[in-house]
Amino acid sequence: MSAGEIRVAINSDQDIVGARQRGRTLAAELGFSSSDATLIATAISELARNIVSYARKGEIKLQKMENSARQGIMVTASDDGPGIPDVRQALRDGFSTSGSFGLGLPGVRRLMDEFEIASRPGDGTTVTVKKWRP
Amino acid sequence: MEVPVLKQGKFLIATIQAALSDADLENLRRGLVQQVVRFRSLGVIVDVTSMDVMDSFASRTLREIAHMIRLRGAETVIVGIQPEVAFAMVQLGLTLEDVATALDLEEGLAYLNTKFKSLD
């Protein structure tokens, strides 16, 4: 798994653009269509923005997934920020604590095939999303 | 990455030429609103053909640009949203609400020309 793993440090809004561009490039290398690569890049953009908005800094990790049947991409967004007190609430459309937009996580979930979140107040947040090549 | 803005008669045309950071989008918002005031523009076209991703921040900033410009009495048209970008926006649940959109620059200009015809 470690081969072909890309780590992008997220420290400012500039890094959001870099992270999503590297994600798009990896998705294209893995044979995703341009349309799927756009969905993946958009999901990375939202996850990276959540890091900048809520935790200030963190990391986006991009990995190739492969098993006997299929190939895909895994994106892990992690930070040591304040964490999310109520994860279930954060996954509902229209919910936001920053007052700016509430579409982030439910939207990202719709863009990708698999979605996992681990978060505890004071202990940071890790969101893992996967998309398989059709 | 600065977004070039071209003055074409009563209209302004802003052409986004590469992926923009949040700061770039905020600069575009400030710059466009200032230029609408300075040139007493009636219409603004924002060409997003080159935008690879339209995420929540970008859509919100474009909406804000259009709403601010409307308060000045001018109209904004967003042109050139790529099909895959539109698909991702819908999946993400993003809309441009009541902001006008058009296929490309030509259609955008046609829209504004029709709208402001009576003022000629």
Image (tube, coloured by chain):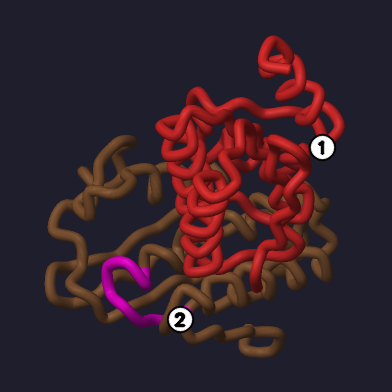
Chain colours: A brown, B red
Residue A64 shows in the view: no
List the residue tagged with mark 2. Answer: A10
Q: Quadrant of the N terminus of chain A?
A: bottom right
Residue drawn at 48 percent across, 37 percent down: B69
Label 1: how many residues lie within 10 Å, few (<14), some (14-19) or many (20+)?
many
List the residue tagged with mark 1. Answer: B105
Chain designation of label 2: A
The vertical placement of A86 against A17, above or below, is above
Residue drawn at 75 percent across, 58 percent down: A70
> Is residue A25 left or right of A76 when viewed as pictured?
right
The disc placed on residue A119 is: none
Q: Amino acid at mark 1?
A: Leu
Where does the image place residue B50, in percent across and percent down from the top left? 77, 55
Secondary structure at badge 1 equals helix
Residue drawn at 76 percent across, 57 percent down: A69
Disc 1/disc 2 C-alpha distance (Å): 35 Å
Secondary structure at badge 2 equals strand
Magenta range is: A51-59
The vertical placement of A114 against A62, above or below, is above
